[in-house]
Amino acid sequence: MISQLDLFKAEVVAFPADRRRVEVIRAAKFLNVVRGGIYAERGWKRICRDMARSLRDAGVEEIEVRRQIMAFQDAVQAELNAMAVRREIQA
């Protein structure tokens, strides 16, 4: 017999981290300002840890959390590259 709970099972799908444009730009701007060193490393780790924690708190499975963080990192790197190109064009 199927219970009502069986009818309402759902998978949590978080908004893709690499599409969170405001967060991607904010992280890239932060890294662009601090430009390496211990502050950049600590700040970057904190950004990624906080995002991972929020995904876990929302019920996202660990393998998907890791995939989302990797996609976010790729998006931030692409934004940093785009910022560098824009600086070169303006120079």
Image: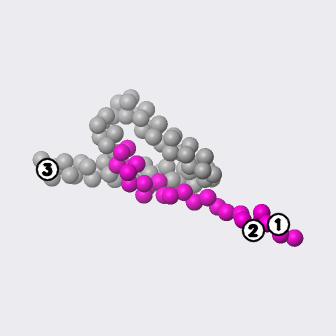
Report helix, strand or loop for mark 2: helix
Residue 31: quarter of image: top left
- Contact, CB < 8 Å: mark 1 with mark 2? yes
Q: Nearer the viewer, residue 6 or 84?
A: 6
Q: Residue furthest left?
A: 91
Report helix, strand or loop for mark 1: loop
The answer for how far apart the CA atoms under marks 3 and 1 are is 63 Å
**Magenta region, residue range:** 1-27
Q: Tell me the colour scheme of the image.
A: one colour
Residue to which mark 3 is pinned: 90
Query: Mark 3 or 1, which is nearer the eye?
Result: 1
Q: Is residue 73 left or right of residue 53?
A: left
Residue 7: quarter of image: bottom right
Residue, x 36% and y 45% (percent of image)?
26
Q: Position of residue 17 (x, y in %)?
A: 47, 54
Mark 2: give few (<14), some (14-19) or many (20+) Cα within 10 Å: few
Q: Is residue 51 left or right of residue 2?
A: left
Residue, x 61% and y 53% (percent of image)?
60
| Circle 1: residue type | Ser
| Circle 2: residue type | Leu
Q: Tell me, for residue 3, which label it has, or none.
A: 1
**Does 18 lie within the magenta span?**
yes
Residue to which mark 2 is pinned: 7
Residue 19, can we see it? Answer: yes
Report helix, strand or loop for mark 3: helix
